[in-house]
Amino acid sequence: FYASREKYLDIISREGLAADVVLRDRFIPDDEVRYYFSAADALVLPYRTATQSGVTQIAYNFSVPMIVTDVGGLPEIVRDGRAGVVCPPTEAGIREALRRMYEQGMLAVVRQNITAERERFSWSAMCDRIEQVYAMTER
């Protein structure tokens, strides 16, 4: 089920967020992506199903904390309490994750951890894993 743009505009208006929210429901070209990630406090991936998401790697690149649902490989990519918050794939789960991120000081903790966490996905770390796999084949 996909909600209409009007539904979100109504929520933004009702909650008095018009001055704080910019709604973009179009494809964002590569040369504009940095502006959105640089301005974001956090990235929310409210997937109901997923295997993984390439958006997580972009968030790591920009050191943006993430809130992801507990589906597919997302909890492996975004470890709870380290690079963000992992929650159930429900409206209540996402609401509680947002509350946890902002009310329990998690945002500051995640910002401290995210540099180390993103190192797991560096070229150096990937090459180390490839060499480990290769070494296993030599036996």
Image (tube, helix red, strand yellow):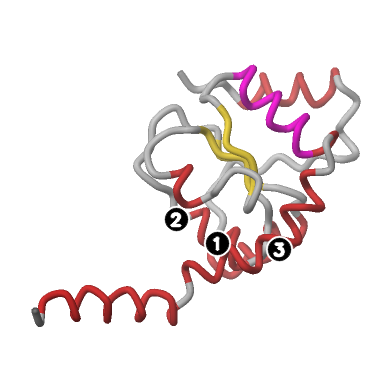
What's the distance in space between the residues labelled 3 and 2, CA to CA?
17 Å
Q: Position of residue 104 (x, y in %)?
A: 83, 36
Q: Is residue 1 left or right of residue 81?
A: left
Q: Amino acid at mark 3?
A: Tyr
Task: Give the labeled residue for mark 2.
Answer: 54
Task: Give the labeled residue for mark 3.
Answer: 35
Callout in the foreground (3, 2): 2
Residue under the point 78% across and 48% down: 107
Give SS at disc 2.
Answer: loop
Q: Position of residue 113 (x, y in %)?
A: 69, 60
Q: Nearer the viewer, residue 30 or 136?
A: 136
What's the distance in space between the residues labelled 1 and 2, CA to CA?
7 Å
Task: Give the labeled residue for mark 1.
Answer: 58
Residue under the point 82% across and 52% down: 108
Q: Quadrant of residue 81 in the image? A: top right
Based on the picture, tell me whether residue 67 belongs to the magenta stretch: no
Give SS at disc 1.
Answer: helix
Based on the picture, tell me whether residue 92 belongs to the magenta stretch: yes
